Amino acid sequence: MEPISTARFRSDDDKLGRHNGGDVTHPLVLALAICAGAAGLEAVLAGRGVTRRFIELRVPRLSPPLKAWIVIGVAYYVICFVVLYRLLVFPRTSLRTAALSLVVIVLLANAVWNYLFFRLRSLRLSFIAGAFYGLVAPSLLTLPIQP
């Protein structure tokens, strides 16, 4: 009698959504939920006056229009989704946890910036938050994550 291969059972577990040590949430669903939650939080914190605030701003001549910023925002969330998904398929390690935490911090910092800039209309506070964001976001590039 031949021994039963455990590789087959692992792939069956993966098809059922059991990843990374028994998680029952599929990485695709979890990445989508995190991005959707962050986008929803961003919308709630920004408030209803985003278009009006954008029109009131005195911007440089070559600054993108609001419609372009919407496309940029969609691209941002697509990138965040891909990064989250890629991280979530890795086995649980402290490095993966650190990377996931940084991505979530970046998403939350973006939502807070929207609150400061659009709802509070505070250029000073949004600048400070942007500086914090500018420090955290590039740190994701320095993490040596290998599959």
Image: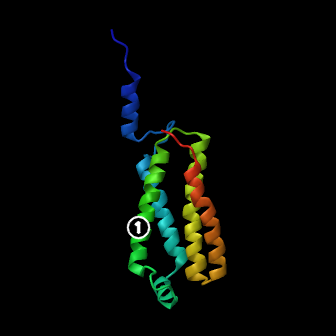
Image location of residue 57, percent across then percent down: 52, 88
Decide if residue 31 is on the left or right side of residue 125: left
Which SS class for mark 1? helix
Of 63 and 87, nearer the camera is 63
State which quarter of the image contains the N terminus. top left
Quarter of the image holding residue 117? bottom right
Q: Residue at horizontal 43%, vertical 53%?
A: 82
As drawn, 44 above or below 121: above
The answer to which quarter of the image holds residue 118 is bottom right
* Image x and y of residue 134, in percent: 60, 65
Of 136 and 116, the residue lying toward us: 136
Q: Residues within 10 Å of mark 1 (few under 14, many from 20)?
A: few
Query: Tag 1: residue type?
Result: Val
Task: Please say if 130 is above or below 26.
Answer: below
What colouring style does the render use?
Answer: rainbow
- Residue at point 46%, 43% (across, down): 89
| Residue 32 locus on image (x, y percent) | 43, 56
Q: Residue at x 55, y 69 (%)?
A: 111
Give the residue at x 46% y 86%: 61
Report the residue marked by disc 1: 74
